[in-house]
């Protein structure tokens, strides 16, 4: 690692130290802000330390062969609306130096183990289904794994054990089936307790 590079932070996962990947930025540069232009024309200044969580940002930085000296002039165009991106920035601020959630399967059931949320994460996802969907799309676009995995878990928590009628209401979907069509579907799918 050169004199200019530092590690984001050392963290622990399951009691074991995990060292983050080196970054080409100094402590001073990590505090600098990059102008992020959103899809609806908004501008949000975001610290470099936050943007390191976005693989899209880091890949763009590398692909354009930029140096830390370019920070002041660099503008990061984000295909995300301002209101959603501001929530993404909030998330990144709370997750600086933290490892991405680990996706694990239960060996007995072979089903995915649900992620456990911190108090902050629980409160962060106390929003509607449309807002969670927007956050998932933004996290996918920016390749922020912690937000993507957690957003998917939050959506699963929100829609789990809901009937088709409840899901239609939650997402504002019109019921386009007649009562006869619904009865036919239930009859054909009795084997799965539908």
Image (spheres, rainbow, N blue to C red):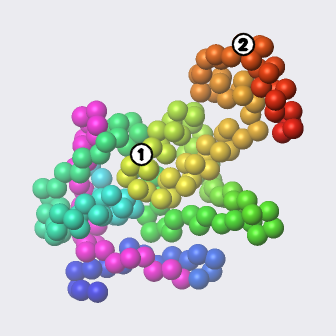
Magenta segment includes 23 = yes
Magenta segment includes 28 = yes
Visible residue check, residue 96: yes
- 181 left or right, relative to 57: right
Identified at 55% across, 55% down, the residue is: 149
Of pointers 1 and 2, the one earlier in the residue sequence: 1
Secondary structure under badge 1? helix
What residue does disc 1 label?
A: 138
Magenta residues, as a range?
Answer: 17-44
In the picture, which quadrant includes the N terminus? bottom left
Identified at 17% across, 63% down, the residue is: 64
Identified at 56% across, 77% down, the residue is: 12
Above or below: residue 87 compared with residue 57? above
Identified at 82% across, 29% down, the residue is: 188
Q: Of 105 and 10, which appears nearest the observer?
A: 105
In the picture, which quadrant includes the C terminus? top right
Visible residue check, residue 93: no
Q: What's the CA distance linking mark 1 and mark 2? A: 36 Å
What residue does disc 2 label?
A: 178
- 137 left or right, relative to 69: right
Q: Of 27 and 182, which appears nearest the observer?
A: 182
Tell me the tag on residue 24: none
> Which quarter of the picture shows residue 161?
top right
- 20 left or right, relative to 173: left
Secondary structure under badge 2? loop
Residue 185 in percent (x, y) is at: 77, 25
Above or below: residue 29 compared with residue 135? below
Residue 14 in percent (x, y) is at: 63, 77
Q: Residues within 10 Å of mark 2 (few under 14, many from 20)?
A: few
């Amino acid at each position: 690692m050169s004199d200019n590079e530092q590690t984001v932070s050392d963290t622990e996962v399951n009691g074991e130290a995990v060292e983050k990947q080196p970054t080409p930025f100094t402590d001073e540069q990590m505090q600098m802000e990059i102008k992020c232009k959103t899809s609806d024309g908004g501008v949000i200044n975001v610290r470099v330390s936050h943007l390191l969580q976005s693989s899209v940002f880091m890949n763009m930085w590398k692909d354009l062969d930029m140096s830390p000296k370019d920070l002041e002039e660099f503008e990061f165009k984000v295909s995300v609306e301002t209101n959603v991106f501001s929530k993404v920035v909030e998330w990144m601020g709370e997750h600086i130096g933290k490892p991405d959630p680990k996706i694990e399967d239960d060996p007995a059931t072979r089903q995915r183990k649900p992620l456990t949320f911190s108090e902050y994460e629980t409160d962060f996802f106390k929003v509607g289904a449309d807002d969670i969907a927007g956050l998932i799309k933004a996290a996918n676009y920016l390749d922020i794994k912690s937000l993507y995995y957690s957003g998917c878990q939050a959506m699963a928590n929100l829609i789990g054990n809901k009937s088709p009628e409840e899901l239609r209401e939650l997402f504002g979907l019109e019921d386009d089936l007649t009562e006869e069509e619904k009865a036919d579907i239930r009859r054909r799918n009795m084997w799965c307790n539908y």
